[in-house]
Structure formats: structure tokens, C-alpha cells
Amino acid sequence: MRIHIHTDLEGVSCITSNEKVLLGNVPQDEYAVSRLMADINAAVDGAFAGGATYVKVLDRHRGGRNFDLSLLDKRAEADGDSTGNWWGELDESYDAAFYIGAHAMAGTPGSFLCHTCNLDWHNYIINGRNFGELGMWGLVCGHYDVPLIMVSGDRAACHEAAAFFNPVRTICVKYAESINHAVALPPEEAYAKIKNATQESMSLIGKAKPFKVILPMEVKIEYTIGWGENRSEDYGKLPGVERVDGRTLRKMSNAQNDIFIR
């Protein structure tokens, strides 16, 4: 069984403050890197214990370059992102997908470092429903008929995953005290829980269905006032894109992986 793992940083275990999140493409905190790799390795370990034959891992926080590949479980392969797509080398050959280090969508109460892709996105809406990065990843997985079966992250992200995907196995590694501060499980406990949840999620392969939406789908982005007005004006000139108002763009698409307006 082939598994593809998408990773982010905000929802990684033991990262409890905004200052420990990697900024730009430069690692700002060695501990954050080590915890990112530990969570990944826990998921890889669980996947193989559950019957995986191949695991590929995509570094997707702020465009990548966050992994310390010397720490990656040698049984796993890093996604080289050869396609240039947000979803890396995910395709129809995979049996299931995981999301490690997830955070909730912008505006979610009781969440740690919530946002959706860019800080100037106020709402990202598909067919009238608000989506975050979890939902976006599910859309892409669904395009390739790959079910998303396991998510780790903060408590709000786990609740969001359960609202979008069923069945799905989630593991909460921390909860928010405020948007910039969280309380986390101890490292050993987080590792064990991620491994166990991942191993258990492998039993969902063949039962969990890929996430699908009605096509053609309506994609809307509402930008934050003052941040995205120029972007809205520029992108509103693209073919097939409608500028609904001063901060909202809209397009129709026949493909679930056509998730961006740019």
C-alpha cells in the first residue's frame, strides 16, 4: 500500500508559540525542525506497522525547505516536488494520504495559528462552504481518488478534519490557549499517539472514500480588507476570473485540483 504524507508546521507537536514556527524558507528554530521530523517519523513508523509498502513525504510549510533529511526515517522518501504543484508528486498511484502538522482555517475560534494559505485570505470558499488547508488537501486528494485517512494537529484542526472527512483518524497533539500560544503533549506521548493513530488509520483503506465535491465547482477567495485589495484587482483581470467586489474573486472549475486563483 502506497501512502503520501502532506506536512505543515503549525500543528506539529510541542511547538507552542508563534516564535518557534519556521519563517520564510529559513529554519528559525532547530527544535521546531526536530519536532517536525519526529512527527513525520512517527507517522511513517505507524504506516509501515499498518501494512504500508511505500511512503512519500511532502514538505509544504511555506513552500518547503524545512526538512532535515538526515533525520527522516530511511524507509520513507521525500517528495522532490518535481511537478511544481502544491501537492507535489501525489497522483492516482497512492492508496491513501495523511496530513501531519495541520492547523485550522482562518477565523476558527480556539485554534493555534489559524489561517488559510495566505494571511490576506479572509475566506476560501468552495460551493458556498468555507475551506482551510485541510479541506484544500482533501480536494486535491479527491481529484486523484485518494482518501485522506489520518490527520495530526491542534485540537481545532482535528475537529475541522472530522467535519470534512468521514471516516478519518485524528490525533490532537496540543490545544490553543490563544491564537499564538498552545499547551502540548510531552514529546514521547505525542510520538506514540501519532504512531498508533497512523497504524490504526491504515485499516480505513478500502473503506474511506475520496473527498468529492459537485463539479463544476465555484471557487471564491475573499481577501482581508487592506491586505488583498491590490491582489484582488490584479487577479481579477485573469481569464475566467470574476472580480465580485473590491476584495472577492470568483471562478468556476471542472477539476478538484484547480484550487487556486492566480
Image: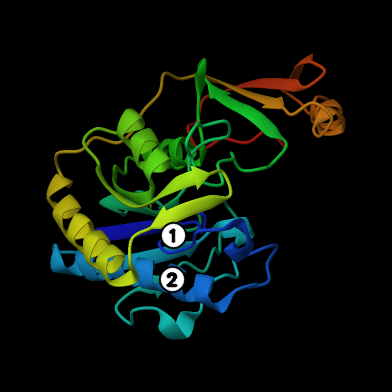
Classify mark 1: residues with Cα within 10 Å, few (<14), some (14-19) or many (20+).
many
- Look at mark 1 in the image and give the residue it sits on: 12
Q: Is residue 247 above or below residue 136?
A: above
Look at 58% across and 34% down and name the residue there.
Answer: 106
- On residue 35, the disc is 2
Name the side, left or right, on which 81 lies relative to 220: left
Residue 224, image quadrant:
top right
Look at 30% across and 63% down and name the residue there.
Answer: 190
Q: Are marks 2 and 1 in contact (CB under 8 Å)?
A: yes
* Residue 25 at x, y percent in the picture: 68, 67
Q: Amino acid at mark 1?
A: Val
Residue nearest the viewer, comparing 59 with 236? 59
Q: Is residue 36 above or below residue 34?
A: above
Label 2 – label 1 distance at C-alpha: 7 Å
Name the side, left or right, on which 31 lies relative to 193: right
Name the side, left or right, on which 24 lies relative to 107: right
- On residue 108, the disc is none
Residue 210, image quadrant:
top left
Q: Amino acid at mark 2?
A: Arg
Q: Earlier in the sequence, mark 2 or mark 1?
A: 1
Which element type, helix, strand or loop, lies under badge 1? loop
Which element type, helix, strand or loop, lies under badge 2? helix
Residue nearest the viewer, comparing 207 with 82? 207
* Residue 102 at x, y percent in the picture: 44, 49
Look at 55% across and 41% down and name the residue there.
Answer: 114
